[in-house]
Amino acid sequence: MNQIVVEGFSAFAGAFFAFLFLRLGEFLTKLYQREVKHYNSLVNLEVQLNEIGGIIHDDLYVLPNFIRVITSGNIYFNNLHTIPIDKSHYENLYDLSLLNDLFSYFYQARKLNDDLITANSGYQDIKNALIQKNINKDDYLINTKLMANNLKQIEAFLIEFEEVTVKLMARVRVQMKYDIPLGTKIQQFLIKTKGDKIKAVEIAKEVKKLKKEIDETKAKSSKEIKNIIKKHKRDTQ
């Protein structure tokens, strides 16, 4: 009787601990996947903030010339670019403090985008009105002076937003150092790259090689185009 009880308990205990370890394994897997999702979102966010910094730089480069051209009575053909907003980070990031900072950042970006879109469409209307001769040059200058004031305000907002972007990027970079998943740390330890050992002379040599390949491709393409034109001329004669 005792043997039957012991065997029954052993079978139960074995099944129980197997179930327990299975659930524990699932929990740890989900935990690691959540860590990876958070970390990957940090990496993507850093890349996106770099791209946003480039867009801000481009707009700040365009604005002075934009203002100068339109206030002198001439037509400007370039456009201001809006800030991309990626809301997927709201779901992927795990840190509430960073999420609050990012929500505030995208809120500012959305307001700035509204101003940029309004400026682009507003000037488009003014430009088209002049081209279609619905307004004269004096009316154009009156409107573009008002537009220039709005563009100067946008320029000030962009300068401030550039600083906010740099601070957020710095925050993300620092957090990436703290939030590396354990599996990623092990991979970094086991998988070694030689990027830090590459010499400047090696890069310069490869650049020279690439330029040569580009020139050869251009020459080949030019020759093919000339041959096509010659063939077309012969066929049409």
Image (cartoon, grey):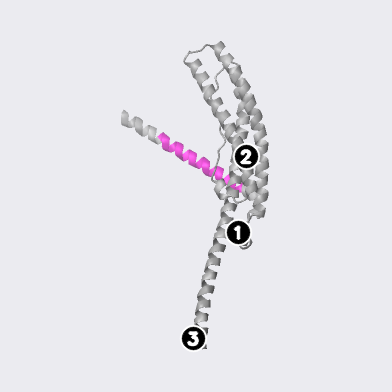
Task: Check disc 2 and report its element: helix, strand or loop.
Answer: helix
Quadrant occupied by the C terminus: top left
Specify which label sits upstream in the sequence, 1 or 3.
3
Q: Nearer the observer, disc 1 or disc 3? A: 3
In the rendered structure, which amino acid carries the disc numbered 3? Ile
Residue 85 spot, x, y in % from top left:
55, 39
Q: Majority secondary structure of the magenta segment? A: helix
Whole-number angstrom distance, CA of label 1 to CA of label 3 = 49 Å
Looking at the rendered structure, the secondary structure element under dot 1 is helix
Q: Pointer 1 and pointer 3: residues touching (CB < 8 Å)?
A: no
Q: Which residue is mark 1?
A: 184
Looking at the rendered structure, which numbered label has been put on residue 4? 3
What is the CA distance from the residue labelled 2 to the residue labelled 3?
66 Å
Residue for point 52% across, 18% down: 126
Whether residues under marks 2 and 3 lie with C-beta atoms below 8 angstroms apart, the answer is no
Mark toward the start of the polypeptide (2 vs 3):
3
Task: Determine if residue 78 is in view.
Answer: no
- Density class for disc 3 (Cα within 10 Å; few <14, some 14-19, many ≥20) is few
Cβ atoms under marks 1 and 2 closer than 8 Å: no
Tell me the residue at 53%/64% (across/down): 26
**Could you give the CA–CA distance between mark 1 and mark 2, rounded to whole angstroms?**
30 Å
Q: Which residue is mark 2?
A: 104
Residue 214 among magenta residues: yes
In the foreground, 208 or 53: 53
Please state which amino acid type lies under the numbered disc 2: Ser
Placement of 27 over or under 208, stated as above or below:
below
Q: Quadrant of residue 30?
A: bottom right
The answer to whether residue 79 is above or below residue 224 is above
